[in-house]
Image: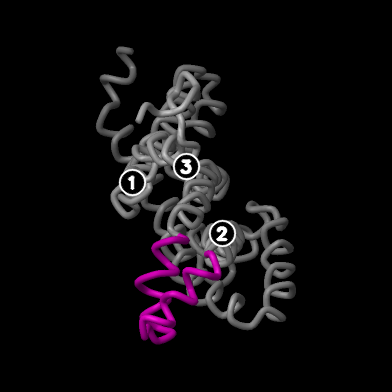
Amino acid sequence: MSWASQNASMLAHLTGQNAYLALLPVLFGLVISLPLGIACVRFGWLYPPVLGLTSVLYALPALALFVALIAYTGLTDTTVIIPLSVYAVSVIFPSVVDGLRSVPEPVRQAAVAMGFGAWRRLVTVELPIATPVVIAGLRIASVSSISLVSVGSLIGIGGLGYLFTDGEARSFTTEIVWGVVLIVALALVTDSVLVLVRRLLTPWQREVASTHPVRRLSVLGGRPGGGDVPA
């Protein structure tokens, strides 16, 4: 604990750097995945080749991509951000497609009957319903990205990954342990924030969950303990 308190400023800096290098690619991945996913839902034939391409890109080793990009972007944050953005797209893109496809067809038809155009229907009906699935993809992409940033420490850019390389070089286990603890803590905090965002963006889910038992009883026409409702 004394080592951590003595190096609190360094740990805070590395944690902030790790968050920046991990979450900015997730944001880029979302920005790319939304229009790409919408296009693939609209034009179904486009989905298989795009999914295949993203799957192949996701299979590429992170360290190999970092090393390959050094010749073009140098030892800069961009060298880490580009591959992590690619990985983020590979995870978020299928979630966007699955989320939009999960919108019930009667809901779409009802929106059309109410005079909603394609754009208005997408923004006010389809995307809100797809939000829980999209955020599920964001949670996976964020946690993965936070972990993968540490690989960048092998080329000198890695946020909390510095604690691993430096701890290994000095045979100092405490430093490595703190690196693991902070990465896990950062992942948990990020995941919790995304869960909160999902709840704020989908308040109707809480309402449905709270009224579901009552609705179920009204449909069955009985009490929790069985029998008919007294007249």
Marks 1 and 3, how far apart in space?
27 Å
Please, what is the three-letter code of the amino acid marked with disc 2? Ser
Describe residue 124's horizontal placement relative to residue 75 as left or right: left
Marks 2 and 3, how far apart in space?
33 Å
Residue 204's spot in the image, x, y percent?
A: 33, 51
Label 3 secondary element: helix
Applied colour scheme? one colour
Label located before the other in sequence (2 or 3):
2
Badge 3 crowding class, 10 Å Cα cut-off, few under 14, some 14 to 19, many 20 or more, is few
Please determine whether, in this image, residue 46 is positioned above or below residue 226: below
Numbered label attached to residue 152: none
Residue on which the image places disc 2:
95
Please determine whether, in this image, residue 221 is positioned above or below residue 67: above
Residue 60's spot in the image, x, y percent?
A: 71, 58
User: What stretch of residues is rendered in magenta?
Assistant: 104-130
Badge 1 crowding class, 10 Å Cα cut-off, few under 14, some 14 to 19, many 20 or more, is some
Residue on which the image places disc 1:
199
Label 1 secondary element: helix
Marks 1 and 2, how far apart in space?
18 Å
CB under 8 Å between discs 2 and 3: no
Residue 106's spot in the image, x, y percent?
A: 52, 69
Please, what is the three-letter code of the amino acid marked with disc 1? Arg
Please determine whether, in this image, residue 90 is positioned above or below residue 5: below
| Front-lying residue, 36 or 67 | 36
Residue on which the image places disc 3:
219
Residue located 50% across and 26% down the image = 167
Tell me if I can see residue 207 in this picture: yes
Q: Is 119 within the magenta?
A: yes
| Front-lying residue, 27 or 73 | 27
Residue 86's spot in the image, x, y percent?
A: 57, 64
Describe residue 124's horizontal placement relative to residue 94 as left or right: left
